[in-house]
Amino acid sequence: MATFRLIIKEITYRKLNFLLGLLAVAAAVALFVSVLTMGQASEREARQLMRDMGFNLRIIPKGADMEDFWATDFADHEMPEEYARRLGSEPGLAVNHLVATLQKKARWRDRQILLTGISPEIVPPGKPKSPMSFTIEKGTVYLGFEVARGLGINKGDEIDLFGKQFTVEKCLAESGSKDDIRVYGDLHDVQGVLGMEGKINEIKALHCVCDGGAIGTLREKLVRALPDTQVTEFRSIAIARAETRQMVEKYMAFIMPIVMLVCAAWVAVLAMMNVRERRREIGILRALGHGSARIASLFLGKAVVVGVLGAAGGFVAGTGIAVNWGPGIFKVTSQMITPLYGFLGWSLVVAPLFVALASFLPTMMAVTQDPAVTLTKE
């Protein structure tokens, strides 16, 4: 009788053992697939949330007085706007989302304002392109909460800003910070208003520690690229980003080996029970002249069948868990939780091998049994 037919007959005869083994493999694969699918969503979610904490790197002219800078929140010196474009094309820098700004205090309609021009984001080649900050169209402005409220200005109003006409595109919500007295405009519009064409006094950027090292290394590279600048970093934001990513990675590295060990133990115990139940059958086969290879093929063949079917069922179950429950957990990146069909191929290869390895020791016990001793006991 062919080996495969013997395997099918054994499966149909000992259904409970087969179903328990199938359940073990399917549960392990389902957990792996769901955790890995949602794990990618978790990494994206953490990256998005950490990114939304804001820029953590500020590049300002070297001659700027740092006491004044921290007191006023902008540098009292200027540098060429071209510096931002130069950084955006500089290879080997672990920075992204560069925004050139020009900020100045001004009196407008008898009120103190922070006139702030911002450029569209500059994204270095190969970096994520989803924007961190808003982009202001030419000829429009955004008004901070206190400015709009104090002057009774609403969205859509036309205003005169130091001799130039602008449309109020948005009145910002209260922030409880200096942003409430800002008037935001396109960088080139603000440069024109201030008579400072081609000048900026700060470049804001996102420094990702995971991409290439600490702030000290970055400073050295920036000094070589832009010798007349200096760099400051918001350490709390940078550390929070790094620690959050490390936490996600450590969690994944911790949970996966535990799942593998539990599944391996479960499969090994079931295989051992199967060997004990089939001692008489094994003894008869050995007495009829079937060698160790044939006996081993029966047990390992069953392990492969269990692994393939369990992998397929586990992939479907795990994907269903991730797709149906994931969006409720990871709300920011919920639309990006989709089936990862590449895991199906890996599951169909790895799961049978894993089950076969877990069944190896019980199989060796089966092939080494003396048929005379086995049949005498029976």
Image (spheres, rainbow, N blue to C red):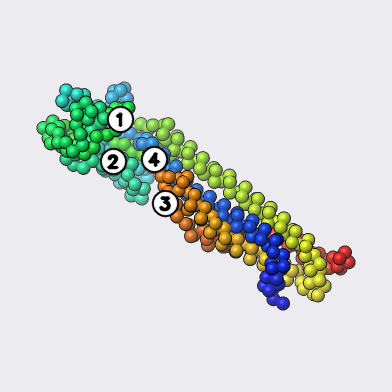
Whichever of callouts 4 and 3 sits on the residue coming sooner in the sequence is 4
Tag of residue 336:
3
Q: Circle 3 sits in a helix, a strand or a loop, which is it?
A: helix
Query: Which label sits in the foreground, 4 or 3?
Result: 3
Whole-Å distance between the Cαs marked 4 and 2? Answer: 14 Å
Q: Callout 3, which amino acid?
A: Met
Q: Quadrant of residue 268?
A: bottom right
Query: Which label sits in the foreground, 3 or 1?
Result: 1
Whole-Å distance between the Cαs marked 4 and 3? Answer: 17 Å
Give the residue at x 66% y 54%. Answer: 264
Q: Circle 1 sits in a helix, a strand or a loop, which is it?
A: loop
Residue beneath disc 4:
51
Tag of residue 359:
none
Q: In which quadrant will I find the N terminus?
A: bottom right
Whole-Å distance between the Cαs marked 3 and 1? Answer: 32 Å
x and y, in percent, of residue 241 in the image: 44, 38
Whole-Å distance between the Cαs marked 1 and 2? Answer: 17 Å
Q: Can residue 208 be seen here?
A: no
Residue beneath disc 2:
134
Asked if residue 217 is positioned above or below residue 178 in the image, the reply reads: below
Whole-Å distance between the Cαs marked 3 and 2? Answer: 22 Å
Whichever of callouts 3 and 1 sits on the residue coming sooner in the sequence is 1
Give the residue at x 13% y 31%. Answer: 162
Q: In which quadrant will I find the C terminus?
A: bottom right
Q: Callout 2, which amino acid?
A: Phe
Q: Callout 4, which amino acid?
A: Arg
Residue beneath disc 1:
174
Residue found at the far right of this picture:
376
